[in-house]
Amino acid sequence: TWFVLNRTLGTTPGPHSADEQPQSPERKLPLSPGPWEAPPVEEAMKPEFRPVSRTYLSSLKNKLSSGAWRKSYQPGASPGPETQVFFQELLKEAGRSKAFPEEVVRLIFSNISSIYCFHAQFFLPELQRRVDDWTATPRIGDVIQKLAPFLKMYSEYVKNFERAAELLATWMDKSQPFQEIVTRIQRSEASGSLTLQHHMLEPVQRIPRYELLLKEYVQKLPAQAPDRADAQRALDMIFSAAQHSNAAIAEMERLQGLWEVYQRLGLEDDIVDPSNTLLREGPVLKISFRRSDPMERYLFLFNNMLLYCVPRVLQVGAQFQVRTRIDVAGMKVRELTDAEFPHSFLVSGKQRTLELQAR
């Protein structure tokens, strides 16, 4: 899925100190004078003490605020970024023809309108003002610090992304009007000849890109630059926002995995609990002295209970039937030494005692 292919959010970030980062090849670009250009002569010869250029700063501003979004925005007009164009057109058609539910459109695009408004009305204007007044106020770190907490709104979008992708695929097959609108916009100049799936993926990748861009900016700042400390603090806040998105992804995966397990167990009311955590599962053999051959069984170990299950012969719906639930609190596991049944162990709890053999 698109979600799995773009798990760059889950990469482990390195230290954020700019002094520990490798020097970028982009430092070889010509740099224009800046208000802090007054190091000693011998230090001025070193590339790390050269000030950032206005060209680089303008490029950074466009990347941070997503220049593509700005190009498509006109005051008083509703279409914004490419994804916003899809959202508005589909929402309009859903309200006009009732060919597909408005709720489906809102679920697919989640909070993309809020993200767009944040960029178009706050983040971009603030950065633009600083770039325009760079000689008097050579800093952007404080601006990013002020607005960085709002970047956590990306977590909601990221958490909804996989479900949104599934809904999009379903309605592209299910509804001809839905498919026609998406296809028409994908072929238009506004979409850049890219698919809706591609545009939907961009917000998922946004925070990791911000982190990389700000790392590069901090690397390019001289040690005596007035923005050095603020930029480093802003980088730490961006890192926190990235972690917030990662946590949202991890929680979504946990709940999805848990729901799949509950479906395999038949969605029994006394078992389904979203706060549970599945620790391990797997097949075992039940030792019975009344039978010469061990019986096939299956265990699900959660943080609070062990489920002892029997595989269903006809796996229509639930795959397993729960025979016993043993509370983890007070449960004991002891390895047995039995020549006839190697790798056997005893599970004892207040509900039941089981003699099992590992497969």
Image (tube, rainbow, N blue to C red):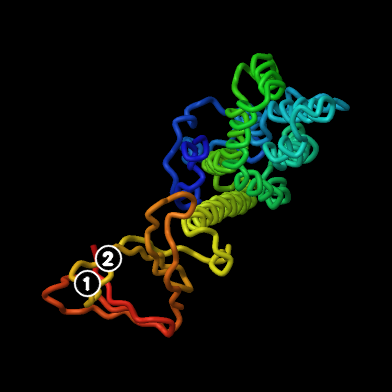
* Residue drawn at x 66%, y 22% as measured from the top left: 179
Q: Amino acid at mark 2?
A: Met
* Residue drawn at x 55%, y 56% as measured from the top left: 255
Residue 47, how many percent across, how many down? 48, 35
Assign the C terminus to one quadrant of the image. Answer: bottom left
Pointers 1 and 2 in contact (C-beta within 8 Å): yes
Q: Which mark is residue 295?
A: 2
Q: Amino acid at mark 1?
A: Arg
Against 326, is 233 above or below?
above
The foreground one among 331 and 48 is 331
197 sits left or right of 335 in the view: right
Residue 32, how many percent across, how many down? 61, 28
Q: Secondary structure at mark 1?
A: loop
Q: Residue most toward the left? A: 339
Q: Secondary structure at mark 2?
A: strand
Q: Which mark is residue 291?
A: 1
